[in-house]
């Protein structure tokens, strides 16, 4: 499984890793679907997908993102019986300490970002 986390909202996106050679190209579609699930309009999704047309893999320097990815990995590992979509929805509703003073959960943070 591949775990992607938005740095600003901490919204998680999960997709099967196999086949690994196509994971990055499949990620854009999965991210778009997740954005739609939480209320992003077509124009916003199209703009985000356009930004993803140039792919780059790099480590993050954001320690909060690393910590959240570690926590999401721990939670996902203990919830393997869940379907992928259900697991992703559950993780998005998980309170995250970097968001405690603002929106508490990634899905709330993402929905708030839509209002801007």
Image: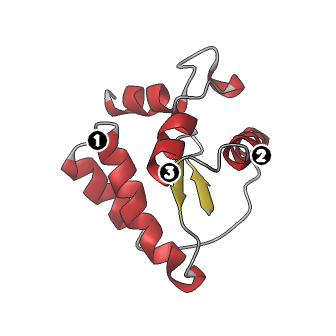
> Quick one: label 3, few (<14), some, or many (20+) residues within 10 Å?
few
CB atoms at circles 2 and 1 under 8 Å apart?
A: no
Label 2 sits on residue? 70
Q: Is residue 38 above or below residue 84?
A: above
Q: Secondary structure at mark 3?
A: loop
Label 3 sits on residue? 83
> Quick one: label 1, few (<14), some, or many (20+) residues within 10 Å?
some
Instruction: Pick whichever of labels 2 and 3 is earlier in the sequence.
Output: 2
Picture quadrant where residue 100 is located: top right
> Quick one: label 2, few (<14), some, or many (20+) residues within 10 Å?
few
Marks 2/1: CA–CA distance: 27 Å
Q: Residue at x 40, y 73 (%)?
A: 53
Picture quadrant where residue 114 is located: top left
Q: Residue at x 74, y 62 (%)?
A: 59
Relative image position of residue 7 (x, y in whole percent): 60, 44
Marks 2/3: CA–CA distance: 20 Å
Point out the image quarter for the C terminus: top left
Q: Secondary structure at mark 1?
A: loop
Number of marks in the rendered image: 3
Tag nearer the camera, 2 or 1:
2
CB atoms at circles 2 and 3 under 8 Å apart?
A: no
Label 1 sits on residue? 40
CB atoms at circles 1 and 3 under 8 Å apart?
A: no
Marks 1/3: CA–CA distance: 23 Å
């Amino acid at each position: 499984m591949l775990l992607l986390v938005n740095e600003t909202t901490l919204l998680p996106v999960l997709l099967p890793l196999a086949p690994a050679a196509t994971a990055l190209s499949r990620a854009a579609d999965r991210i778009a679907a997740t954005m739609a699930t939480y209320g992003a309009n077509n124009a916003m999704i199209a703009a985000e997908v356009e930004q993803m047309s140039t792919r780059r893999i790099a480590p993050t320097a954001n320690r909060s993102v690393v910590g959240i990815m570690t926590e999401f990995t721990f939670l996902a590992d203990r919830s393997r019986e869940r379907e992928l979509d259900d697991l992703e929805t559950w993780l998005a509703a998980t309170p995250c300490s970097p968001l405690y003073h603002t929106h508490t959960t990634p899905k709330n943070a993402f929905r708030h970002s839509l209002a801007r």
